[in-house]
Amino acid sequence: MPGSNLINMMRFFCVLGLMGVLSSVNAQYLTLDEAISIALKNSLNVEVARNNFEASQINNDLSFAGGIPTVSASIADNQSLTNLNQRLSNGTTIKRNGNRNNALNAGLNINYLLFNGYRVRYTKSRLEATEKQSSYNISLQMQNLVASVMVRYYDIVRQNEYLKTLQQSINVTNQRLKLVDARQSVGLANNADTYQAQLDLNASKQDLLSQQLILDQAEADLLTLLTLKPDSTIAVKDTIIVDRAIDLEAVKSNLKINPAFLTADQQAIINDLVVKEIGALRYPAISINSGYNYSRNKNGAGFTLLNQNSGPFLGLGVQIPIFNGGIIKRQQNIARIDIKNAINTREILLNDLENFAVKAWLAYRNNLERLETERENNRVARDLLSLVEQRFQLGVGTIVDLREAQKSFVDAGFRLTNLSYAAKVAEIELKRLGSMLVRGQ
């Protein structure tokens, strides 16, 4: 029968396509802990933050603040050839060409700053605050990275659950097609039922292929986040389990230890120290100078043929600022504005963090409540599908009833998986805001 041949060809090609999707590959199973460990190890953003922290550690030294004595040495040896024409007060005249002269000067100089309005102290404090801010930035990058990895990881779990639901639906459709074929062979079904069952199977397989593409793309996104080749082959075998013990007040109380807030708070401290640094420029700078000088001048002709001096020296230097056009005052006013801006930025950030926490909490609680109902719906949809399938096998149910039960089962599975994922994402966001994902550096 031409219709039967067409159906068999359609089945053959669809099975080939499905086998290509579900064929076994050398996939490496990846756990969440492994994914997080790889991401933290390979992340370039974390590496940049760590490099900046290392640079701030190097920079946080008393020498950069100007509190360490400076020692310098110098030496100069000049040879010259001169023509001498010299008339002395006693009437003697000296004329001589081609005189060789040598001037040798050497010295060791030590300079130590005694006082400059405590500018050294303020600068050192600012360098310490900058180092601390860099450490907070590492924690911020790590918290954000871990949260992103978890979201991507559980998205793969979600897409896998979608795939399983579609596969279960295809199994039911296959059973339905076999039953229709069996009925048709004994004259209890017509070609229309067979065609409809085959079309439904083909549509389900197309959905499965589309879902496989979404899953592959989700895996590529995770691999990119792990700084691995996006065409690598991995597999995730996990389930979405939501932590139900998160407390909103605990999250809100932790907002002030959120790395983003600590970074903004540290910026306000840094700007305050900048004001003090600038203010120190109004005070006199007192320094002590000491060292050793050596000087030797040798002339081929003239009144002085050899002049040599050597010995230590000690001096006190005072630099008093008197007037510079009001630049220091203007710089201080600008720095005070920077303090206000840093404080305002910190408060804005705190308000935003609290807003994000409340919104994430509302989504978290709402999804948890809906999750309970959806689990029941999923169980009912599964039981309904099993019941309708049995009725269809017994000949008391219709194809339409079975198709509707299948659709309800697939929709319920999608909703359950989506709600589980949404609740998990809200949980991750709450933990990120409350700095509960990563401790330390």
Image (tube, rainbow, N blue to C red):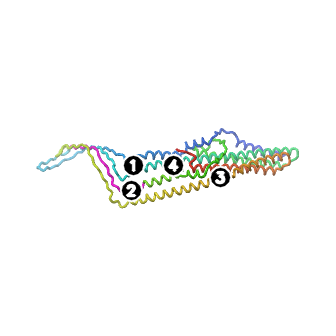
State how far apart marks 2 and 4 are (Cα).
29 Å
At x 64%, y 52%, the residue is 364
Magenta-highlighted residues: 274-298
Give the SS element for disc 2. Answer: helix
Give the residue number, with chain letter if any, for mark 1.
Answer: 65
- Category of crowding for the residue at label 1, using alpha-carbon neighbours closer than 10 angstroms: few (below 14), some (14–19), many (at least 20): some
Label 2 vs 1, first from the N-terminus: 1
Instruction: Check if mark 2's residue and mark 3's residue have beta carbons within 8 Å.
Output: no
State how far apart marks 3 and 1 are (Cα).
52 Å
Depth check: give the residue in front, 386 or 224. Answer: 386
Circle 4 or circle 3, nearest the eye? 3
Depth check: give the residue in front, 71 or 83. Answer: 71
In this rendering, position of residue 353 left or right of residue 88: right
How far from the left and from the top, in percent, is residue 374?
72, 50
Circle 3 or circle 1, nearest the eye? 3
Give the residue number, with chain letter if any, for mark 2.
Answer: 279
Amino acid type indicated by mark 1 = Ala
Depth check: give the residue in front, 5 or 264. Answer: 264
Instruction: Check if mark 2's residue and mark 4's residue have beta carbons within 8 Å.
Output: no
How far from the left and from the top, in percent, is residue 431?
59, 49
In this rendering, position of residue 213 left or right of residue 57: right
Amino acid type indicated by mark 2 = Gly
Task: Indicate whether 18 appears above or below 331.
Answer: above
Label 2 vs 3, first from the N-terminus: 2
Q: Label for residue 365? A: 3
Amino acid type indicated by mark 4 = Asn
Question: Is residue 287 on the magenta stretch?
Answer: yes
How far from the left and from the top, in percent, is residue 315?
27, 48
- Category of crowding for the residue at label 2, using alpha-carbon neighbours closer than 10 angstroms: few (below 14), some (14–19), many (at least 20): some
Give the SS element for disc 1. Answer: helix
State how far apart marks 1 and 4 are (Cα).
23 Å
